[in-house]
Amino acid sequence: MGKHICILGGDGYLGWPSAMRFSALGYDVTVVDNYLRRELCAQYGLDFLYPVPRLKQRVALWEAVSGRRIHLAELDLADPENMRALFNPTGYERLCDAPWPGAPEAVLHYAEQPSAPFSQRDYRCTDLTLVNNLRVTSNLLCAVRDLSPRSHIVHIGTMGEYGTPNIDIEEGWLDIAHKGRHDRFLFPRQGASVYHTTKIMDTDLMWFFVRAWKLRVTDLMQGPVYGLETEESRATPELRPYFNYDDQFGTVINRFIVQAVAGHPLTVYGKGGQTRGYINITDTLQCVVAAVQHPAQAGELRIFNQITETFSVRELARRVREVGRKRGLKVAIEHVENPRTEAEEHYYNPTYQALRELGVVPHPLDNATLDSMFDIVQGYAARIHPEIIFHPLQQRQPREQD
């Protein structure tokens, strides 16, 4: 098999930077997307911090600055025939208008509705999340089983699958001793949203296909990601990933920095004791490259916890406030009612060593990193719309589509 990688969800916050990284490393890269997240943001008025070209323009710009071509297919992977077409020469050449590069060495699966709050907004959003996420995963597993069984599936899961158990969180698996007998099981899952529950179902589906048909799968349990640029986009801002700062699709550090720049209090849910694992977008790229370059074996579901360090929400707010004040901003912290069903004070001790053993060198969150993010956000301060920073969709009516 050649160095061909197919990235599902290649327009996304992580999908597009991953496409550039693998292209820069010499892979033949194919990106696939139907622009679902863009369409949802447009429907509900959730603007990006800065304009982001669509994939055709980004692919052309990347080729101009790098000399390397990324192939593109714009289609809905919840349709099984679309998914299967990607894995045969005739279908691929029709969809991508490019020569068949051979069966993919790896398939990077980001193609899911990624927002926990959005997944529970109403029954329509719940249905969309369940149907899209589970059908895309099922379609991928069936296509690889039937058409490309040597392809390595790398799936972006979430640390949110585990919840906040009162025991240490192992890397995906737990050894159990019960009534004198021993076995090894998937670590117990307890997602806190419909979105997280679809990710749990993804893991169960993948585990079944691995057992039944000896597929090779790596599931990366990723924490919330922060950051605005990568090595490939640093000199060309138009190649940056899109950046949400709303309360549906924006992640907490990104949102706090926008709030600080806009003069909006940093909105901490409840007491702010909710503790999670976080990761810089540059380290996400390190992790997915390591996973692809050290593939799972046939019949193996390999699970890595993909985080760099843990923080409580109030710790993050205080760090953003400190850096913002040093920059002359008037940054306040406001504790607001928590709209989520979650423990605000809890034990949280995940294991996350396996990716480091594969060579990942983590970049801890420091003031220099926050400063660089402030620099970029302040450059787009005029584009910040304060009304969407903290305005739950439950109180907002969507534009009718029919």
Image (tube, helix red, strand yellow):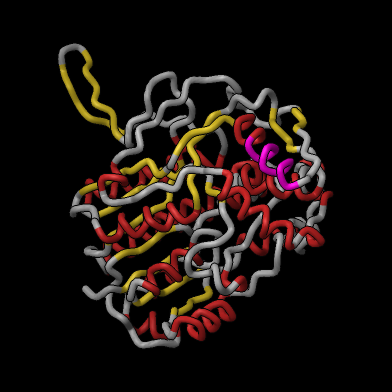
The front one of 157 and 75 is 157
Count of number-bearing discs: 0
**Is residue 369 shown left or right of residue 357?**
right
Label the magenta part by its dominant secondary structure: helix
| Position above or below: 306 against 89 | above
Q: Quadrant of residue 173?
A: top left
Judge whether residue 34 can be spotted in this image. Answer: yes
Q: Which residues are magenta?
A: 319-327
- Residue 320 at x, y = what percent? 66, 40
Which residue is drawn at the image coordinates 48% and 83% (left, top)? 63
Which residue is drawn at the image coordinates 56% and 77% (left, top)? 58
**Is residue 153 shown left or right of residue 372?**
left
Question: In what quadrant of the picture does the C terminus appear?
Answer: bottom right
**In magenta segment, residue 3:** no
Extreme top residue here?
179
Question: In what quadrant of the picture does the N terminus appear?
Answer: bottom left
The front one of 117 and 324 is 324
**In magenta segment, residue 321:** yes
| Position above or below: 121 against 101 | above
**Is residue 258 shown left or right of residue 227?**
right
- Residue 318 at x, y = what percent? 66, 33
Which residue is drawn at the image coordinates 39% and 85% (left, top)? 93
The front one of 30 and 238 is 238
Which residue is drawn at the image coordinates 53% and 69% (left, top)? 233
- Residue 100 at x, y = what percent? 33, 83
- Residue 81 at x, y = what percent? 43, 70
| Position above or below: 185 against 361 | above
Judge whether residue 198 can be spotted in this image. Answer: no
